Amino acid sequence: MITIGKLSKRVGLSRSTLRYYDKIGFLHSSLKSETGYRLYDENDAARLERAIILRNAGVPLRQIFGVL
């Protein structure tokens, strides 16, 4: 399991961006730690990485979120 901070560093996005993606339903934390931290698994990370690749290729977020 990966914390939001580690995932943020891994993909190069801010934690607030990841929290926003969670809020709009695109990125779902798999679990929460006992202290309330969002935890993500490798499937979550891979999905986010695919979205970043598409975004860098110029695909609008709205379209990416509908596809993935």
Image (tube, rainbow, N blue to C red):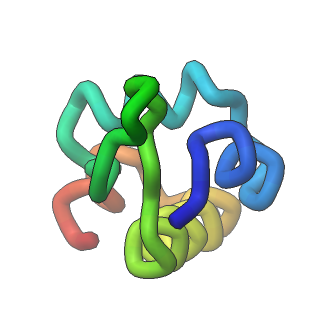
Q: Quadrant of residue 53?
A: bottom right
Nearest to the observer: residue 64 or residue 12: 12
Across and down, in percent, residue 64 comes to 34, 60
**Looking at the image, which residue is at 66% across and 53% down?**
7
Q: How many labels does the image show?
A: 0
Across and down, in percent, residue 2 comes to 58, 59
Across and down, in percent, residue 57 comes to 64, 68
Quadrant of the image for the C terminus? bottom left
**Looking at the image, which residue is at 41% across and 67% down?**
44
**Looking at the image, which residue is at 29% across and 57% down?**
30
**Looking at the image, which residue is at 51% across and 36% down?**
18
Q: Residue furthest top?
A: 16
Nearest to the observer: residue 29 or residue 62: 29
Nearest to the observer: residue 39 or residue 48: 39
- Residue 9 versus residue 66 in the image, above or below: above
Would residue 27 appear left or right of 10 to someone viewing this image? left
Q: In which quarter of the image is residue 10?
A: bottom right
